Amino acid sequence: MSAVQILTGNQAAATAVKLCDVQVISAYPITPSTSLTEMLAEWIEKGELKAEYVRVESEHSVMTVCVSASSVGARVFTSTSSHGLLYMHEQLHWAAGSRLPIVTCVINRGVGAPWSIFNDQQDSISQRDTGWIQIYCRDNQEILDSVIQAYRIAEEVYCPVMVCYDGFVLSHTMMPVEIPEAEKVKNFLPPYKPHTILSPEEPLNINPVILPTQRRDAQGVLRDGYMEFRWKLQHALEGSRDVIVEVNRQFADLFGRDHGGMLWGYRTDDAEVYLVGIGSLATEATMAADMLREEGIHAGVVGIRVYRPFPREEIRNVLKNAPAIVIFEKDISYGYEGALSADVKAALYGTGISAPVHNYIAGLGGRDVKAAELAEAVRSSLAAVAGGVMERQTWLNCVTE
Amino acid sequence: METRDENLSAMCRPAVGEAGRTGDWRDATPVIDYTKCIASLKNRPACYLCWLYCPEGVVIAGVPVQIDLDYCKGCGICAEECPAKAITMVLQKEAKP
Ligand code: SF4
Ligand code: SF4
């Protein structure tokens, strides 16, 4: 029997990790991710979760443990936030390049300087080029379900997956969450089969120095060069879209919850303005859309669930008739614009879709963002669009002069 | 047509190297003159600074002192540190195997 419990986002994630029979966990505490791994550590200590918990001195070593354990065939998990994720950065590349299906929860928090413990998405967005799949969650149910889906996806395409959710807004907020039956999760998630079996009988040198060109190994087999391996990673991420969509579909069939695959839409059918966002900010945008509709402005919302691989086709499809696009995001690619805004515009290039795109940088370092403020931003953008302003970048709720 | 490399990530099997157990990167080989080496002269364990300083741990501290040339990389630190100037680095092509 599945049961409903009132859980924080971190408790929902920990519950999913337990259901997935994770074998090795390594983590270093950092707010707001700490309570997730504390819960896992407690279960291991009580013998409720048969996993090994590896304590290390830093997040860099955390990811090294994950890489090693995953290489020898263990299902592994870690979670972190902000500076912890940044400290892992070098090993994130190693995990992706080694094609290891590691699942990491990133509990989104702003990065210093200056210090902030509060939420934005600068930490994970700035890791987008490491070769990890990135899934962003809207609510605590989606966190639990996405962690389970993440292992299926990761172990099928042999790419690591980050399951990202907003610090405090989701990680420490309680919501009803349906806990699936352990047996059903087992059926959905077959045991992990590593792409390479390591054994003392057949020793291998993993990730040796590799030359720019293809080269014959000592056995005479032509081995790929650096670029071929990097192409395989890109090919795997591009190809993972189909797997992500299919896993979401199968999950919906089995558990009755459809989180939208690559992205989700809200009241998009007849929309005259599209609000686009990631994570809980996109949820907030749905309330803004309702408010706008009450006053006769047909607003719809597009929530990006998977940011890498980027939902190129899905974006083109959902925005093909968009008269105006307003993008809200909790990150900034300094010296340019919001990363999501740049990516959405790039996806539209060459399609003939030439809608105005206004970009709002919002909620950095935990600054509060209310639905009414999003609605007001949309009203102001629509007025500017009527005046012919095609492109605009605004820092919402920020003193800029 | 050549079959593709099926590995998803880079890896290789250990194999015989160009110089046997390793590659052939050593340019100069340490050669010990036992008429100068302190351990040999005293005919008992002594000095062993070469053993202490060798970054590869390939000096065998016995009487006489020996060097495992399978793994010696030819850096010459042992020759530099030897207080008796008993070790000479001989260019690889001149050294006897
Ligand atoms: S040459 Fe270098 S590696 Fe070889 S024995 Fe001397 S110190 Fe060791
Ligand atoms: S350092 Fe020189 S003298 Fe001392 S043990 Fe080595 S070879 Fe002999």
Image: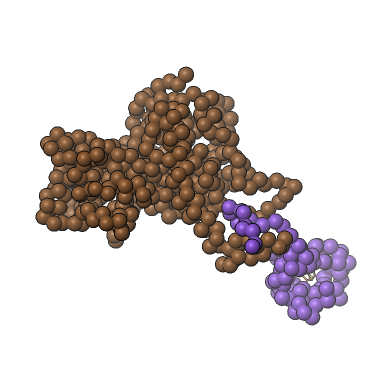
Chain colours: A brown, B purple
Q: Is residue A223 left or right of residue A88?
A: right
Q: Residue furthest front?
A: B1
Viewer can see residue A204: yes
Viewer can see residue A117: no
Q: Residue furthest top?
A: A1
Q: Quadrant of the C terminus of chain A?
A: bottom left
Splitting the image into four quadrants, where does ligand 2 fall?
A: bottom right
Q: Is residue A38 left or right of residue B89?
A: left
Give residue A391's position: percent from left, percent from top. 20, 57
A319, A263: nearer the viewer: A319
Residue at point 71%, 75% (across, down): B27
Give residue A105's position: percent from left, percent from top. 44, 40
Residue at point 27%, 47% (across, down): A319
Residue at point 51%, 38% (across, down): A152
Residue at point 40%, 21% (across, down): A4
Give residue A88's position: percent from left, percent from top. 47, 50
Q: How many marks?
A: 0
Residue A9, relative to residue A209: is it above or below?
above
Q: Is residue B69 left or right of residue A147?
A: right
Residue A309, relative to residue B42: is it above or below?
above
Q: Residue furthest right?
A: B43
A347, A212: nearer the viewer: A347
A343, B82: nearer the viewer: A343
Give residue A165's position: percent from left, percent from top. 37, 39
